[in-house]
Amino acid sequence: MKTGKLYVLSGPSGVGKGTLREHALKDAPNLRYSISCTTRKPREGETDGVEYRFISREKFTEDIAQGLFLEYAHVHEDYYGTLKADVMNELESGHDVLLEIDVQGALQVKEKMPGAVMIFVAPPSIDVLEHRLRGRGTEAAGSLSVRLSNAMKELALKDEYDYVIVNDDLDAACDELRKIVL
Ligand code: 5GP
């Protein structure tokens, strides 16, 4: 059986990666989403095992020591990571896999799996991103400024990616991603 393809989607918090990912998963029937582990607390409406596997710092540290992660990173104020076994099982069974991860993790994947297709989602501007993050209302003021300063650092690394999608118009951005994953 043909091994699946790995797609890595990154971009600053609030840029609309989640929405683009949902559309891509609907459009590409062979595409599977890899659910990450995180030490962040669930937001209202989030369920363990759906958006993330919510685990303790102790468990996360143990999993790092056991080499279970394909990649992991300290993002904003928490740890996030992708389980190697999840991704490999899907790829080996012929499914394509989509990771939605930050740039630090994405660069680890790029090094370990050179065939991965790297996609960066950029905001039309930092002002637009700030506006979107405020509108989302999920972040406290401190966390918002951490996310904005991280956004600048992430944007500086966009040349490491194969594709850059500017999420100005959602339909157009979805269309671009659909073309890449199909
Ligand atoms: P949020 O807390 O808003 O759900 O996610 C924060 C950031 O963590 C996002 O940029 C998201 O892409 C990133 N992220 C989510 N899962 C992973 C993961 O498994 N690994 C890495 N490196 N980053 C992740």
Image: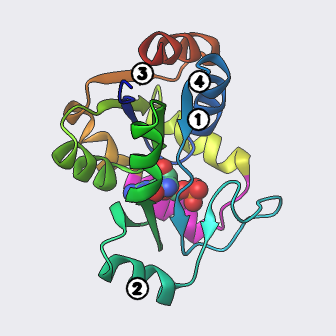
For marks 3 and 2, the one nearer the N-term is: 2
Mark in front: 1 vs 4: 4
Distance of mark 3 from mark 1, alpha carbons?
11 Å
Q: Which is nearer the eye, 141 or 25?
A: 25
Distance of mark 4 from mark 3, alpha carbons?
13 Å
Examine the rendered structure and indicate whether residue 90 appears above or below residue 124.
below
Mark 1 crowdedness (10 Å alpha carbons): few <14, some 14-19, many ≥20: many
Distance of mark 2 from mark 1, alpha carbons?
32 Å
Q: Which is nearer the eye, 176 or 140?
A: 176
Magenta-highlighted stretch: main secondary structure? helix
Residue at the spot of label 3: 165
- Residue 24 is tagged as 4
Residue at the spot of label 1: 16
Residue type at mark 1 is: Gly
For marks 4 and 2, the one nearer the N-term is: 4
User: Answer yes or no: do the residues labelled 2 and 1 have beta carbons within 8 Å?
Assistant: no
- Residue 181 is tagged as none
Distance of mark 1 from mark 4, alpha carbons?
12 Å
Examine the rendered structure and indicate whether residue 82 appears above or below residue 115.
below
User: Answer yes or no: do the residues labelled 1 and 4 have beta carbons within 8 Å?
Assistant: no
Labels in figure, total: 4
Q: Secondary structure at mark 3?
A: strand
Picture coordinates of residue 46, whole percent (x, y): 76, 60
Residue type at mark 3 is: Ile
Distance of mark 4 from mark 2, alpha carbons?
33 Å
Picture coordinates of residue 166, whole percent (x, y): 44, 22
Whether residue 15 appears in this view of the structure is no
Q: Magenta region: which residues?
A: 137-150
Mark in front: 3 vs 2: 2
For marks 3 and 1, the one nearer the N-term is: 1
Residue at the spot of label 2: 62
